[in-house]
Image (cartoon, rainbow, N blue to C red):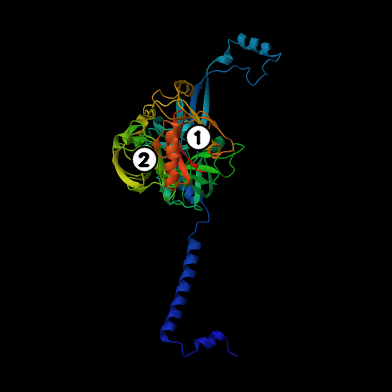
Amino acid sequence: MQPKAIAVSKDRSLKPRDRMRLIWLGVLTMVLVMAQALMAQARPESLAPLAEKISPSVVNITTSTMVEGRSGLQGIVPEGSPFEDFFREFQDRNNGEGQRPRRSSALGSGFVISEDGYVVTNNHVIDGADEILVEFFSGDELPATVVGTDPNTDIALLKVEPEEPLPFVSFGDSDLARVGDWVIAMGNPLGQGFSVSAGIVSARNRALSGTYDDYIQTDAAINRGNSGGPLFNMDGEVVGVNTAILSPNGGSIGIGFSMASNVVTRVVDQLKEFGETRRGWLGVRIQDVTEDVAEAMGLEEAAGALVTDVPDGPAKDAGLLSGDVIIGFDGVDVADTRALVRQVGNTAVGKAVRVVVYREGATQTVLVTLGRREEAEGAVPAAMQDQPGDDVQEKTVLGMTLSILTDEMRRELGVPDNQNGLAVLDVDEASEAFEKGLRAGDVITEAGQQKVGSLDELDDRIAEAKEAGRKSLLLLVRRAGDPRFVALSLTD
């Protein structure tokens, strides 16, 4: 019996077009097999060639700082010990040497970004240092000066004065880094000198505690002393600056964080040009739009940034209002508050941008000329409207015992004299209001995106929401001056 494959090949009923398809399929299969073989041969067996290429641009950084002298008794004898007087007398005989200022040293890493001597590192590596010494891969050392720092992203730019052009590295596009891509961390871990570790990108867009955080998470070993060092991709480009680790014992457990290069490059460019950062400032206080807040406002999806307050500044001048939901900024959709803060911060100071807001069931576009955030860090919230002259009364509603604000309450709560609203006297611990964080001492200034200064006005807002088919009521709550929106379910 002939094999089936031969029988098929001799089947004269096979059409010429089908024969050509089989031939091309066979050719394509052979090409793919050959391509895979070539890729396997082209894949480097070692990272040594790449490490040798980029190592000369990585530096060790040593800082020196004069610190206040501490008593030599600290850490030697316990307080109240019978030996305490003996050691104090010993120090007194030595002219109080233990109290003299002393010099403290610290170690970190960095990398050269230009042949004329610009060096990038972490701000916390050089913060407060009196002297900064940069050691190169060759063993040469040069003193460095601080060009500028940005504590918000923990980036510092240094400058050394070399006699000859320095080897340097370039930044890559961190947005192209994919989870699973190979990366290399280089630096001075635990003061051991130049060291290389390899791993992969474990996650993207991590936020730790900063407003402008955009960290690449990696399992490449990062330890103390690696701070400020570069995270390279396989093309030898810097895609991150090693900044922090998550560790219960101070050592690497495979969870390290590098500030993304696309954040760093903007900061470095500004530090080089101005010696400081210049970020755009919109001038609003915002919070994320949750599902219940979206339902209470009639939004189709929980996205955008909800404006809780508009102090004096660009947004107020342009007509933005508390209760607006910012859904677009300068032609880009706003996903949440973090995205908006980064978009605004990355926009040039003085630029006129179009801000799309959702207001009273419709969208509007407002033109805002951005200010500078660094000049407005201490902005004070705008004052509210005058208080109506309602009689003092209390009422329990939505799980809260409420009262109009009195002068005595204003003094106790630190509320401005001209602010009106409803003071929260008590919150039922079994209520949704308690679950969502409302507490005695909070002040409700708006309900249903309209100002409330009396209990009757709150009742009206509740009735209007129910008539409109709303399942929840949006409240603007202030605590110690800080506003936030809370949506509470409406129950009969």
Q: Tag 1: Cα neighbours inside 10 Å, few (<14), some, or many (≥20)? A: many
Between 238 and 304, the residue placed more toward the observer is 304
The secondary element bearing badge 1 is classed as strand
Between 364 and 333, the residue placed more toward the observer is 364
Q: Is residue 55 visible?
A: no
Residue at 45% x, 23% y: name it.
406
What residue did someone put label 1 on? Answer: 108
Q: Is residue 144 above or below residue 214?
A: above
Reading the chain from its start, which is encountered first: label 2 or label 1?
1
Q: Position of residue 222 (x, y in %)?
A: 54, 41
Disc marking residue 162: none
Q: Position of residue 233 (x, y in %)?
A: 46, 49
- Disc 2 versus disc 1: nearer the observer: 2
What residue did someone put label 2 on? Answer: 344
Work out which quarter of the rendered image holds the N terminus and state it.
Answer: bottom right
Q: Is residue 253 above or below residue 67?
A: below
Left or right, 483 with reference to 202: left
Say whether marks 2 and 1 touch (CB < 8 Å): no
Q: Position of residue 168 (x, y in %)?
A: 40, 42
| Number of marks in picture | 2
Q: Amino acid at mark 2?
A: Val
Q: Amino acid at mark 1?
A: Gly
Between 16 and 162, the residue placed more toward the observer is 16
